[in-house]
Amino acid sequence: MEVRINRGVLSLAEGDITTQDTDAIVNAANKGLRGGGGVDGAIHRAGGKRILDECIKIGGCETGEAVITTGGNLKAKYVIHTVGPVYRDGLHNEPKLLENAYWNSLKVAAENGLKSIAFPSISTGAYGYPLEQAAEIAVNTAISYLKEHADIGLIRFVLFGQHALDVYEKKLSHLS
């Protein structure tokens, strides 16, 4: 699914984020930026040691913030690492922190002159954020960014599994 918003495109796809040819892919990282499970581990394995070396130099990243490294062996030239919130009950600033993770990733991409970016569904794996709520925040944030800025031409959500794709498609069709 793909929609045009302002001068940009918001698209949804099911697949493996490590194979995307966008200027940057986003890593759902942990605060230590040391690699881990899920998307984080897959990106570090596919991208190679250069990504980890740069992450070690950066030192860490707070929840809702974003930092950039090389893409190493990936097709994408860069990886933007962001830390989403661990979901507790939705009453501990989780929605704002998740919105910040997406927004700050887009901001880092724009600051580095990047024109295309691919996101996973941040915080919906091991961090336990409910998929429906997370999808709404992700899609809303992307739409808001594209309405306000013309610097990024493509925002793609690369989702793991048909169910996640269906949830995002439903949210996008209601919000765009």
Image (cartoon, rainbow, N blue to C red):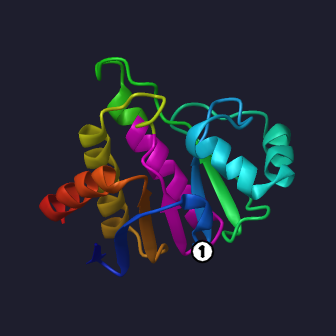
Q: Is residue 103 visible?
A: yes
How far across and down, in percent of the image, does residue 146 sit?
A: 36, 68
Q: Secondary structure at mark 1?
A: loop
| Residue furthest to the bottom | 7
The answer to whether 78 is drawn above or below residue 69 in the figure is below
- Which residue is nearer to you in this view: 161 or 102? 161
- Quadrant including the C terminus: bottom left
The answer to whether 80 is drawn above or below residue 110 in the figure is above
Name the residue rendered at 52%, 66% in the picture. 117
The answer to whether 39 is drawn above or below residue 109 in the figure is above
Name the residue rendered at 45%, 74% in the picture. 154
Magenta stretch contains residue 63: no
Quadrant of residue 12 within the rendered picture: bottom left
- Which residue is nearer to you in this view: 134 or 66? 134
The answer to whether 58 is drawn above or below residue 166 in the figure is above
How far across and down, in percent of the image, does residue 124 sit?
A: 40, 37
Quadrant of residue 40 within the rendered picture: top right
> How dense is the environment of label 1, judged by Cα within 10 Å: few (below 14), some, or many (20 and up)?
some
The magenta segment: 98-122
Name the residue rendered at 36%, 34% in the picture. 96
| Residue furthest to the left | 174
Name the residue rendered at 33%, 33% in the picture. 95
Q: Is residue 111 left or right of residue 118?
A: right
Residue picked out by circle 1 = 21
| Residue furthest to the front | 162
How far across and down, in percent of the image, does residue 81 sit?
A: 63, 47
Q: Is residue 133 left or right of residue 126?
A: left
- Quadrant including the N terminus: bottom left
Magenta stretch contains residue 105: yes
Q: Hey, what amino acid is under mark 1?
A: Asp
